[in-house]
Image: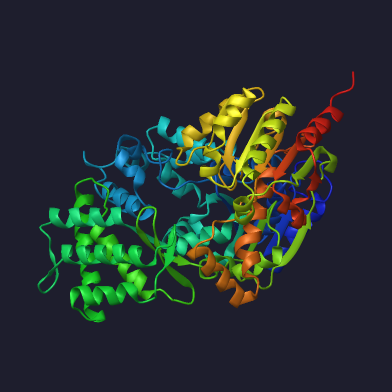
Amino acid sequence: MQFFPYTPRSSQKEFVEFVEQCVKDGIPGIIESGTGTGKTICSLAGTLPYALERKKRIVYLTRTASQQKQAILELRKISKLRKIFAIGIQGRGVSTCPKIVSDPELMSGSPEELSRFCSEFKRRSGTPSGCKFYDNILGTDMKEHISFCETNMPTADEFGSYALERGLCPYEMMKVLVQKADVVIAPYHFIFIPGTRERFLGWMNVPLRDVIIIVDEAHNLPDHLREVMTSHYTIRALDLAESEAREWNDPEVDNGTSATDVVNAFRRIMYLAKEEYLIEEDGLIPPYFVEDGLMEEMGATSVKIRRMCKALVELGEIVAETKKMNGKLPRSYMRSLGAFIQFWIDTEDEVYVKLVIGEDTALEAFCMDPYEAAEPLRSCHSSIHMSGTLEPLREYQNVLGLEDAKLARFPSPFPSENLMTIHATDVTTKYDDVKKDKEIMTRMKEHIVNVINSVRKNTAVFFPSYSLMDTTINDVRTRTGRKIFVERKGMTQSEHARMLDMFRTSEDAVLFAVSGGRVSEGIDFPGKDMEAAILVGMPFSKPGAKQNALIRYYDIRSGNGWEHAVISPATRRMRQAIGRLIRSENDIGAAVILDKRAAAYPLLGSRESSDTAEDVKEFFEKRLPKS
């Protein structure tokens, strides 16, 4: 416990020792630990002794800026015990690239596009058309800035402000600083996107085998890795590819065949797929539908189709390079089209399912298995995976292929009586029941209104979908008279933050959100910020072709497709939402699940209630301070 800066709570010593042993053995550690176990500090205190002694480097992976900030704050405490250096880094964005602030087009750039854009300005270094922020770095003594960071250990935002105030590029400075850091706190994609990982480890000047990876909020990792491996293409992107082709005089991609010929053929295939295979929101496409369709539309062999795609990519490279030379984002829609078709044709049917998506008319090659993308976790020295909602641990281990991992569970040290979780017995969002009983949704609204009116507390209401949320807002507003805040789909980060600040500083307010959304995961609501939560129904993923394919895949692989694809994600979303209530030993909170099916899932820890509003009222009255 030499790197533990607090008086240990229950099980924290065991937590640290478990991590230490995993790191010494060079194996993964998979941990579910309840609120208050100190996941961040325990994982760092457990990895640092071995890392410093054996000259290993720690990469702490987070999903959000708030999680990254928390890691930095804990590392500052550790540094008072023993001198260490840590740095939090972000990808190119508003806080790390001054040029993005002045050019809104760059906000939509991919990491690859922004990297190429940046390289052009660095090439022009020392000229009026170069980047002054990069040029200033070349003329500065980095010792002063390294000393500042070693002494103050700034968060990524603080460091960005520090650099910009001095006219320096934060991103380029970060690349220098990570070489010297014992711990680097970074977003997931720095390790799990191959090109980004290669560059990142190059900056650190360390091979992956000498890296210890800590994965925060690890319950999100399998889906994140699936997204990394998935490719999605919309009709909107196809329209942009056509515009770009015409702008470049519709170049040939084969003898007598132009870029727009490929675009138009692909458009017909996309609409045909939608017409023939779309069922509600998505539909399964036969494996060779696109390739066969292109051969028929173009009167070409599969070899010729591949040649056309290669030509589109090469033409797109010329377009992107030209844009880069002109100081524009090096993006090409022709290149994206060619690359997508190549990817679609080359994907393995055992691991991928091919879909048509109806909402924006798109094709998607969806990766069902995150095993390949998880390779860095099997190649690094050791990895520590932790979350408050990681159960079932064995499932997580198997999905990522962490065969030699050790598993552990550490319960919350906070008093269990501070949290009450109950479920109603007369409502559900199960489709068949709602169809049979027309009064269920009326009773659901009654529960929501009555619980809100039973206590004057800041309350969150979590819905399984935005559409169900929208049908409830007006009734609740009218019948409770409370101020209502709403988590809307597509909110920017700043809009979302402002909305949360207003909710937190209000009294007796109601926050409408969705299970699995930003409010329900990774955001703290300590004290009176949120004291009650209502979960409307079980947030099972909507049935569809993608969901059914995932169930079939894991049925074949491990015999637990329904558990893996339906039950585990839904209960995890609910446990995350309930977890917003208790963030310290003094917090109290009541969670009400409006679905009788909750009784079947012991991980939720709920008991049945015949009067949810009365039970919530009684719970808080018993915890009023005695006069």
Q: Where does residue 538 sit, x and y in percent of width and height?
A: 65, 51
In the rendered image, the residue lying farthest to the top is: 627
Q: Residue furthest right?
A: 627
Residue 444 or residue 115, whichever sits in front: 444
Q: Is residue 306 visible?
A: yes
Observer-nearest of 178 and 274: 274
Q: Quadrant of residue 167?
A: top left
**Residue 381 percent coordinates (x, y):** 62, 66
Quadrant hosting residue 402: bottom right
Is residue 131 shown above or below 571?
Answer: above
Q: Is residue 352 above or below residue 410?
A: below
* Residue 164 or residue 430, whichever sits in front: 430
Question: Residue at image x 47%, y 32%?
Answer: 495
Q: Quadrant of residue 459?
A: top right
Where does the C terminus fall, quadrant-wise? top right
Horizontal side of 140 relative to 90 (left or right) equals left
- Give percent across and percent down for residue 28: 67, 65
Please state the total of marks drawn on the protein image: 0
At x 61% / y 74%, what residue is drawn? 555
Q: Residue at coordinates 49% horizontally, 73% vertically from top-left?
A: 351
Answer whether residue 73 is visible to the viewer in this image: no
Residue 618 to residue 240: above or below: above
Please, which colouring scheme is shown?
rainbow
* Front residue (pair 552, 75): 552
Q: Position of residue 551 (x, y in %)?
A: 57, 68
